[in-house]
Amino acid sequence: MKKETKTATVDRLRDKDFEFLDVEEEAKGHDRFHLSATVIHNSTDSVFGISATARRILIVPRYNCTFEAFLDFYRLIIERIDPDAEFRLVGDETP
């Protein structure tokens, strides 16, 4: 895997529980934003990918993923990025 990379959004998410690898971030104004990265949850060794826009984050399990890792990441998003963020499973989306 690539070395850990720094970007503005990932800097806000820095936490002892997570490592961010292969980070790609592009911001073109407030509404046009894209972030992708591989995330490692240090306490469970869960590995998952994230793909984010200004309105949504998609979390994709890759290796040894636990629900605990997803909830810890969600907590981090609420605390540092968006206190109104909602957690939904694929298929639970409303039209």
Image (cartoon, helix red, strand yellow):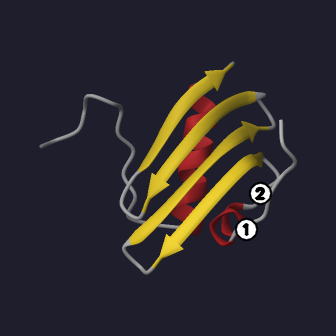
Which one is in front in this view, the residue at disc 2 or the one at disc 1?
1
Note whether 24 is above or below 22 in the view shown. below
Q: Number of marks in the image?
A: 2
In front: 83, or 53?
Answer: 53
Label 1 sits on what residue type? Answer: Asp
On the rendered image, what quadrant is the N terminus found in?
A: top right
- Kindly tell me whether residue 35 is visible in this rendering: yes
Report crowding for label 1: few under 14, some 14 to 19, many 20 or more residues within 10 A (C-alpha): few
Return the residue at label 1.
Answer: 11
- Kindly tell me whether residue 65 is visible in this rendering: no
Report whether 82 appears left or right of 46.
Answer: left
The picture places residue 53, in percent across and down from the top left corner, at: 43, 58
The image quarter containing residue 29 is bottom left
The picture places residue 38, in percent across and down from the top left corner, at: 68, 40
Note whether 34 is above or below 92 in the view shown. below
On the rendered image, what quadrant is the C terminus found in?
A: top left
Please, which residue is most extreme toward the top here?
A: 64
Please, which residue is most extreme toward the left here?
A: 95
Label 2: state its secondary structure.
Answer: loop
The image quarter containing residue 14 is bottom right
Return the residue at label 2.
Answer: 15
Q: CA distance from mark 2 to mark 1?
A: 9 Å
Report crowding for label 2: few under 14, some 14 to 19, many 20 or more residues within 10 A (C-alpha): some
Report whether 41 appears left or right of 71.
Answer: right
In front: 17, or 8?
Answer: 8
Label 1: state its secondary structure.
Answer: helix
Residue at 73 percent of width and 46 percent of height: 22
Residue at 74 percent of width and 38 percent of height: 40
Does the CB distance between marks 2 and 1 fall below 8 Å?
A: no
In front: 75, or 34?
Answer: 34
Label 2 sits on what residue type? Answer: Asp
